[in-house]
Amino acid sequence: MVDVRVRFAPSPTGALHIGGLRTALYNYLFARKHGGAFILRVEDTDQKRYVPGAEEYIVNSLEWAGIRPDEGPGIGGDYGPYRQSERKAIYAKYTQHLLDSGQAYYAFDTEEELDQRRESEKAAGNHNFRYDAATRGGMRNSLSLGKEQTEALLAADTPYVVRLRVEPGQMVHISDTVRGDVAFQSEEVDDKVLMKADGLPTYHLANVVDDHLMKITHVIRGEEWLPSTALHVLLYRAFGWEKSMPAFAHLPLLLKPNGKGKLSKRDGQQLGFPVFPLDWGSGEEHLSGFRESGFLAPAVVNFLAFLGWNPGTEQEIFSLEALVEAFDLDRINKSGAQYDFEKARWYNQQYLIATPDEQLGPRVEAVFAAHGHPVSEELAITIAGLLKERVHTLEEFYEQGLYFVERVGITDEKTARKKWKPELRPRFEQLRAALGELDTWTALTIKDRTVAFMETNGLGFGQVLPVLRLAVSGSTSGPDAFAILEAVGQEETLARLGEGYNLLDRVKAS
């Protein structure tokens, strides 16, 4: 049995979209499920679109998600180099093979000549000019010019590209694991450029050559590449590699939340949610990432796995290891997957709840520190335990828990007016004094002293607890009130109660 080998082959032209991370994840899961190898290959042949820092961003994104390649740039392997820009000699060799066998040809047409031909075709009513078997005879190439003229142009260092010679009348059948049987006529494929004038290959040539030489057994990629697969199969035929061609699986598109159209890189900015694993860029070009938005990597991975795949059970929470066990290409959907950000938040909340407070504490500590409010490790662990069932992201620990470290005033004035009875202030001053007499400051001792006060004064929880909450945290919502007071500390609680009663008087009078 052939060892499974899959690859994730991004182009370093910008930030890695979340759809690209899903493609990497599915490749990784498939490789691990079958005891195979997961290869990272950087397809950087398009130097015009190359963006400095993009490759590092891709590597960091995979690392954050726990998707670790077995081979790739900086890792090594038996089939390198793993950057296409470092494989020029390899592509030149295989391009020459196609030229020598008559499967490809030189084309000397300049950009101006191609533009003129397009315009003349347009004038004749043909708005979709294609360089193919029907038109190549009227162009400047080695098939139309003949051997002598071609050799003269080459000797004169005339710029050229190399095109694949696609002849009509060929059927191309693809057995796609997700799509089923897909058929193309060779007439649908034009004579694509394989080698550009700068000596670098196009995506199509490099892709096929690399997949063959790296012994890739399965190509798992986005649905947008399905139309190109006919060309790739024709290339495999031209090289005589059709029998060793990899199996194909084209993944469904990620759709906008409303299901209308493909999720784009700009949708996150426009709709207010991340569509990238990590932050990218700055200023007006800043694109927010899941990590910096307070998401845990395992939660994002779990969320992504279900965008186009399901295990066939009701189970929704899967660790990376569990996903490896459950993953099957046969359970990938054909239809596009809607991007549901609220579901991503739900997943993150489940992972926050499942994380022990001691492990979550340092993450909470880091969030508060990032906002200029350093907290102790002990308090961070306490905040984690009190809020994790109420928040969806790490960032929300700060947003909902600022009152643990700072006096925030009265944030719920409507409830304050309803709950605060100025005539009861003398009694609440008694409660403040009683709490000040406690030698042990815990949620239990605070509760016992408060209950004793209520019984003595004929007051109920509904009259007392909202006032304590408002005075200490500014709101009537939140975790257990006595746990909040314990976390805030005795001295600070007493100070806030005194200040809070004054604030409540002012709110009531306003």
Image (cartoon, rainbow, N blue to C red):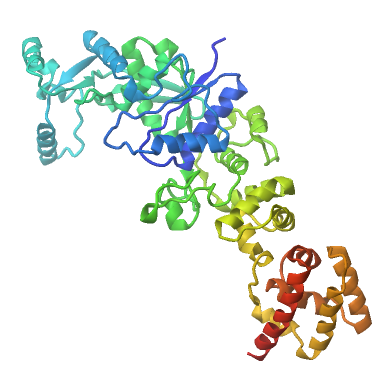
Q: Is residue 29 left or right of residue 82?
A: right
Relative to residue 376, is residue 124 depicted above or below? above
- Given residues 410 and 169, the one toward you in this image is 410
Q: Position of residue 246 (x, y in %)?
A: 46, 18
Q: Is residue 294 left or right of residue 441?
A: left
Can residue 346 be seen in this snapshot? Answer: no
Quadrant in the picture for residue 480: bottom right
Q: Position of residue 363 (x, y in %)?
A: 63, 49
Quadrant in the picture for residue 106: top left
Relative to residue 22, is residue 181 depicted above or below? above
What is the number of callouts on the image?
A: 0
Q: Is residue 486 left or right of residue 388?
A: right
Can residue 32 be seen in this snapshot? Answer: yes
Q: Residue at x 58, y 28 (%)?
A: 29
Relative to residue 121, is residue 274 depicted above or below? below
Q: Residue at x 37, y 30 (%)?
A: 227
Q: Position of residue 478 (x, y in %)?
A: 72, 65
Q: Position of residue 287 (x, y in %)?
A: 43, 50
On-image quarter of the N terminus = top right
- Given residues 355 and 134, the one toward you in this image is 355
On-image quarter of the C terminus = bottom right
